[in-house]
Image (cartoon, rainbow, N blue to C red):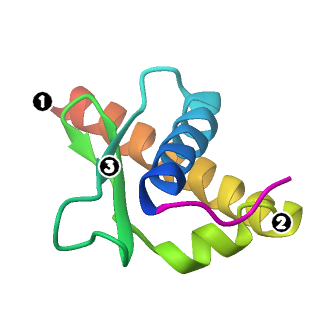
Amino acid sequence: MFSGGTYHEVARWLWNFLTAHAKRVDPRVEVAFEDDDHREGKSYGARLRFGRHLGAPIELAFREVADNRGSLAWCSRLAERTRALARQVVEQGVADARSG
C-alpha cells in the first residue's frame, strides 16, 4: 500500500474510498465531498447523501489521511465508519420517504 501524496491526490483517493464503501451498503448512496479553498492542504469534509437526505459530516485532516491510507488497520476502521454512516443515512432517507 501507499501513503503520502499531494492534497489533490489524497482527495481523489479518499473520495473513491468513501464512495466504494458507502455503495456497498446501497448503490444509491452518494458522497458529497468538500475540499474547497479554505480546506486546501489542511482537511477534507464529506457527507453521505441518500436522495435528499444528508448524513452527519465526516471530517478528516489531510495529514492523517495521507499518512494512514497505506495502513490496513486505519483503512478498515474508516471503511466500517463509512458503512455505518451509510446505513444511517439510508435508514433516515427511507423513513423520511415513508412519512412524507
Mark 3 → mark 2, Cα distance in angstroms: 22 Å
Q: Secondary structure at mark 1?
A: loop
Q: Nearer the viewer, residue 35 or 5?
A: 5
- Is the magenta region chiefly helix, strand or loop? loop
Q: Under tag 2, what secondary structure? A: loop
For badge 3, the amino acid type reads: Phe
**Residue shown at the point (73%, 64%) measured from the top left:** 3
Which residue is found at the position 43% from the left and 37% from the top?
Answer: 90
Q: Quadrant of the C terminus?
A: top left
Looking at the rendering, which quadrant does residue 97 occupy? top left
Residue topped by disc 2: 71
For residue 100, the mark is 1
| Residue placed most toward the observer, 69 or 89 | 69
| Amino acid at pointer 2 | Ser
Residue beneath disc 3: 33
Q: Residue at x 29, y 58 (%)?
A: 35
Q: Which mark sits nearer the N-terminus, 1 or 3?
A: 3
Do the residues bearing badges 3 and 2 touch, measured as CB atoms within 8 Å?
no
Tell us which disc is closer to us: 1 or 2: 2
Percent across and percent down for residue 94 are: 35, 31
23 shown above or below 2: above
Name which of mark 3 and mark 2 comes first in the sequence.
Answer: 3
Q: Height in image: 63 above or below 7?
A: below
How far apart, in angstroms, are the residues tagged by discs 1 and 2? 43 Å
Residue interval drawn in magenta: 1-6
Q: Position of residue 21 (x, y in %)?
A: 63, 39
Query: With 100 as the anchor, is 12 left or right in this view?
Result: right
Question: Horizontal placement of 74 versus 35: left or right?
Answer: right
